[in-house]
Each structure stands twice: as C-alpha cells, then as structure tokens.
Amino acid sequence: MPEINVSALGLDYAGKTAIDDITFTAREGEFLTLLGPSGCGKTTTLMSIAGLAQPSRGVITCGEDVLFDSTRSIDRPPERRNCGVVFQSYAIWPHMSVADNVAYPLRLRKVGKAEIARRVGEVLEMVDLAALAERYPHQLSGGQQQRVALARAITYGPGVLLLDEPLSNLDAKLREQARTWLKEFQSSVGLTTVFVTHDQDEALALSDRIIVMNDGHIEQVGAPEEIYSRPNSPFVASFLGSANLLAGTVIESGRDSTRVRLDGSGQTVAVREPGPDREVLVMVRPEDVEIIDDTTGDESASLQGNLTTRMFVGSSFRYVVDCGGQQLSVSSRERWEPGPVRLRFRIEGVRLFPRSAADQLATDIEEPVHA
Ligand SMILES: Nc1ncnc2c1ncn2[C@@H]1O[C@H](COP(=O)(O)OP(=O)(O)O)[C@@H](O)[C@H]1O
Ligand SMILES: [Mg+2]
C-alpha cells in the first residue's frame, strides 16, 4: 500500500487561512488520525488529499504519484487519486440495494458484469454484509449503513482510505462496536488510512499515530501513548485526556529537578525536568495524583488541600480538591470523605509548560456542525 506525503500544505478560503504549513507522512498500511476540535482544519486537510478541496500551496504525493503540487500546477482529479473516501454522512443511495450501492463505483468505471458480481461479493464479505446484499439502506442499522459506505469506498481497490468522522453519527453503544470492527478491518486489509475525528477516545483506541491539530496547524505528532504521557503543550494535554494545569513560579531550577511554588497556596512541588520559564503551568493528570491521609504528617512530598466534591464514575471516583484556590481533579478507586487531605503527585507524570503557552487552551470543544 502506498505512503501519503503531505508537505507544507495550506488552504485559504477567501483570504482566511483554514490550514497552514501542514506536513506529515501516512506510512504504508498505517492508521493515522487527524484529531482536533471542530474547525481546526481536519476535513480541509482530508479533502485536499482526496482532491475535493483545492489547496492554495503545498505538495501531496501518494507513493510515486504527485497528486498536487502548487508550484508545478499539478492537481490530479479525485477519480484518479486511488483514494477511497467515507464521509460522516455516509452518502449511500437510499433507492439502491446494498449490492448496487457497492457496485456503483465499478459501474462508473465500466467494469464488466461478472467482475462486478465477483468484486461486490468479496467486498461485502470483508465488511460482514454478505447476508444483507439485497436489503435497502432503510432496512439497515446505522452501523451497517456505515459499513456499506466503507464497502463502496474500497470496492475498486484503492490503496488509501480517507475517513472523515465515519462513526460520529452512531449512538454511543454502536459507536464502540463499530470502532472495534473498524480497527480489526483496517489491520486485516492493511490499507494506508487517514482518519479524522474530534473524539479523543476514538483517536487513542484506533490509531497507530495521532496528529493533533489546532487552529489550522499541527500541534504534535506521535503514538497515542506518547502523546498522552508526553504532551508538548497545554492544548494537547487538555485536549487528549483531562489534565490539571496549575499556575506556579519556578523557585529552584536544575537540569532534571525543578521546584515550583504554586500560586494561591504557596506550597511547592518537585518536577523532574527543567523549568521552561519562570512562570509555569504544572501539568498532572487526575490518575497521577494520589490522595493520602491528612494525618500521616508526611509534609515533604505532598500538598495540603481540601476535598470539596466526590463523583462516582463507575470504575473509580473523581474528586475535586482545592489547593489555595486552584482546583485539582483527582481520580482514585478509594473512597474519601470531604475535608482536609494530602495529595502526592506521581513525579513521572508531572510536566512543565511556560505559562505563556496557555493562550491556546482547548477550552471550547464542541461537536462539529458539518463533516
Ligand atoms: N467551504 C468553505 N468556505 C469557507 N470557509 C470554510 C469552508 N470549509 C471550511 N471552512 C473553514 O475552514 C476552517 C477549517 O474547517 P474544517 O476543515 O471543516 O474543520 P474541521 O473538519 O476540523 O471541523 C474553519 O474555520 C471553517 O469555517
Ligand atoms: Mg470536519
């Protein structure tokens, strides 16, 4: 399967930049996800690869083929790009049976009848819909309709699959099933896949690598575990999972040990990395904070706080602990009562960001309004 290279891609709509300087490679057979809040440019990037949006600048290649190059005026039409595309809205034909929907791209390409029948049978087998070939879309569940769209996208054997929020119209339970199914499907067919979502759980669960996008540019690229445990900005930290970001000031700085005094309570925390600036944000995830008994007297390695809220979330409790006006979210399987507590941070999980990096926080995350 071919590799896709996107280099310095930019697209302006009527003078307003939608994406800028987008550079990445989707490796052979890789499941690569573009993740970010609504409006950050995911669809624009994907449609540029598909040939359904025209970039203002940059180069896109697929294997040896140059699909787009602004300086050489190359812009290959979508039907000659070897990409199967699935949109959020499925866009399958309501008046055609499952088999006819899947056969459609082959009929367009004037493939012979016998070959169409063979290929449709094969593809429906791959997406677990062989038994439903004669049904019409309204006789299918949302998940099954989505698989028809996927079957139609791969029926002519593209090397690349481009998926724009394909699961987001399904309800929560179906979406989880569809996610598992898609993961198994993609790894068995080995198609190079670029997947778009604003759903961080989906991105973490499905991807070989994730590209986190924000406001038209790339924030970070890496394997899910890597981005989750080592986010390189407050934006990524708070968009992928939940993160406490505590304002503080560096009071002692070494190469691999820094002491930070937190605003409000004036208490200090130790961090195992250099301070990026004097004014910082201390990042720690809720599962990396431990609540310990206030009476242990172990003041050296812990913070004093006041537990104000407890929420049971099924697998654990979620607590809010106030430390001198800064609220911390803490995840724990143990049951604690409101009142004074001590908190200990798992030091491997603590990161520092310059406070100036907080401008672009992922605060306003909403559902996308279009595909
Ligand atoms: N056809 C269009 N005309 C003008 N602006 C657009 C058009 N499509 C998208 N945009 C703008 O480009 C930006 C990126 O949009 P999009 O790629 O759809 O984001 P996402 O898929 O991440 O939600 C947004 O600001 C959006 O309003
Ligand atoms: Mg979109």
Image (cartoon, rainbow, N blue to C red):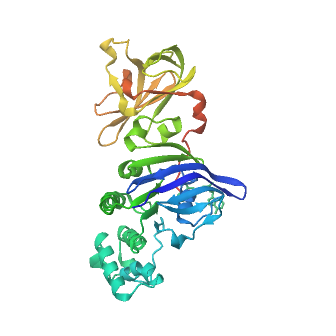
Please state the horizontal and vertical placement of residue 88, each as a whole percent of the image: 47, 64
**Apparent side of residue 212 relative to residue 301 in the rendered image (left or right):** right
Using the rendered image of the protein, determine whether residue 371 is visible from the camera's viewpoint: no
Residue closest to the eye, 144 or 336:
144
What is the tally of numbered marks visible in this picture? 0
Please state the horizontal and vertical placement of residue 306, each as a whole percent of the image: 42, 23
| Residue furthest to the right | 15
Residue closest to the eye, 180 or 261:
180
Please state the horizontal and vertical placement of residue 12, each as a whole percent of the image: 67, 56
Look at 42% across and 21% down and name the residue there. Answer: 272
Please state the horizontal and vertical placement of residue 162, each as a whole percent of the image: 46, 62
Residue 211 position (above or below residue 108): above
Residue closest to the eye, 136 or 75:
75
> On the rendered image, what quadrant is the N terminus found in?
bottom left
**Apparent side of residue 267 relative to residue 123 in the rendered image (left or right):** right
Quadrant in the picture for residue 226: top left
Residue 90 position (above or below residue 173): below
Quadrant in the picture for residue 124: bottom left
